[in-house]
Amino acid sequence: MNDNQEKVGTVNKQWLITIILCVLVGEIGVHRFYNGKITSGIFELLTFGGFGIWYLIDIITIVLEKFTDKDGNYIKIN
């Protein structure tokens, strides 16, 4: 595989926007809406980021590249 091909199951263009949205307005789930996770975004909105716990877990999973979009693709840096 050459450097121009993406790995199967990864999305690299969304990582920066996702982490910025999570850090700035993650308590209301905007990063989840952005990645197509509407149902969990609504729950995060209604609970203010799971009372802060879900919000912190999301930041950690995004940084560790374990956060997925609605299709199950990992949001990766590269």
Image (spheres, rainbow, N blue to C red):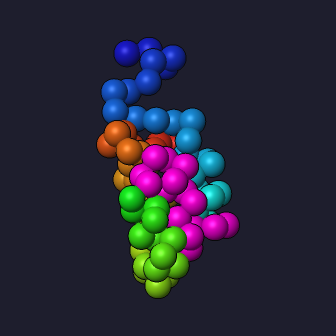
Residue 26: image x %, image y %?
57, 67
**Residue at 44% from the left image edge and 24% from the top image edge:** 6
Query: Toward the viewer: 16 or 39?
Result: 39
User: Which quadrant would the N terminus be assigned to in this image?
Assistant: top left
**Residue at 34% from the left image edge and 39% from the top image edge:** 71
**Residue at 56% from the left image edge and 41% from the top image edge:** 14
> Does the rendering let one see residue 49?
no
Image-based side of 2 in relation to 15, left or right: left
Q: What stretch is highlighted in magenta?
A: 24-38
> Does the rendering let one see residue 27?
yes
Image-based side of 17 in relation to 38, left or right: right
Q: Compared with residue 62, is residue 52 higher up or lower down, i.e. above or below?
A: below
Query: Toward the viewer: 63 or 27?
Result: 27
Magenta residues: mostly which secondary structure? helix
Q: Toward which corner of the image does residue 43 lie, by quadrant?
A: bottom left
Residue 13: image x %, image y %?
57, 36
Residue 61: image x %, image y %?
41, 61
